[in-house]
Image: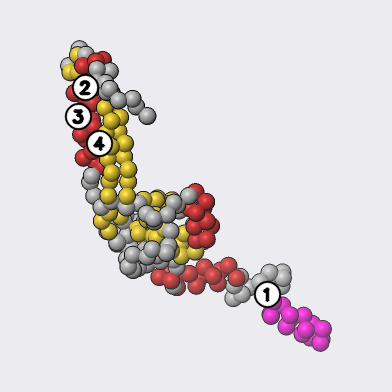
Amino acid sequence: MTGSELAEVAIIAASGDATGMPTNDVKSTEERHLERDRKKPQDKMREAEEVYLLMHRNCRVSRNIRANWYFEHLDKPVQIYSGPNDMSNEMLVYGMTPVDGAVEEHVGNEQLLFTRNTKMIFFAKLYRQVYVLDLSPSTLVADDEAGCCLFTLLIEHFKACLYSLTRQMVLPGKQLTLRPAIYLTVLVYTPYLTFEEKTV
């Protein structure tokens, strides 16, 4: 075998087979990354499906502030806040659910990846609700099909609405209980009730 043939054999042995294709011993970068992920599945961060954000009660959290929070935390890990009440932050993460995870799963202090597919849910510690009830004479007319008056159905549905409104909410992730303050106003309209004072 001549010197040129020996050099050609050495090149083939170093780079691959005689066709120029790499041998099975040489792995691509993607294959090495996949193998590394398979060896360390516990190091792979899970994605967040829902993130529950508590809005500050002493400042107005506008849409621009919410959008800024979204872009600042996009493709970054987020964690449930477990410290004391922080009055400097406009929004704090108080609950999370992972992708393909149960709602009652206890995430604890685990960090989840906030992606563009993550749903943001905002809530507050103070709510103001205003209800306007129409008690005009037409609500007291009996309905033959329903077997009752519209007034009866109106009161029953209003009662069920108030009951659902006052129920406590358990935030997922750390099972924190939310008990917000609710300021309720009920206005009743009827044409037979008038006031001598002029309305403003």
Which residue is label 3 attached to?
156
Amino acid on which the number 3 mark rests in the picture:
Glu
- Residue 151: give its label: 2
In this rendering, position of residue 19 left or right of residue 148: right
The secondary structure that most of the magenta stretch takes on is helix
- Give the quadrant of residue 13: bottom right
Which residue is under mark 4?
A: 161
Q: Secondary structure at mark 3?
A: helix
Classed neighbour count for the residue bearing mark 4: other residues with Cα under 10 Å, few (<14), some (14–19), many (≥20): few
Q: Residue at x 46, y 65 (%)?
A: 77
Residue denoted by label 1: 16
User: Disc 2 marks which amino acid?
Assistant: Phe
The amino acid marked with disc number 4 is Cys
Above or below, 129 relative to 138? below
Please name whichever residue, 127 or 92, is drawn nearer the observer in this view of the structure: 127
Give how far across and how far down residue 66 sits, in percent. Answer: 48, 53
What residue range appears in magenta? 1-15
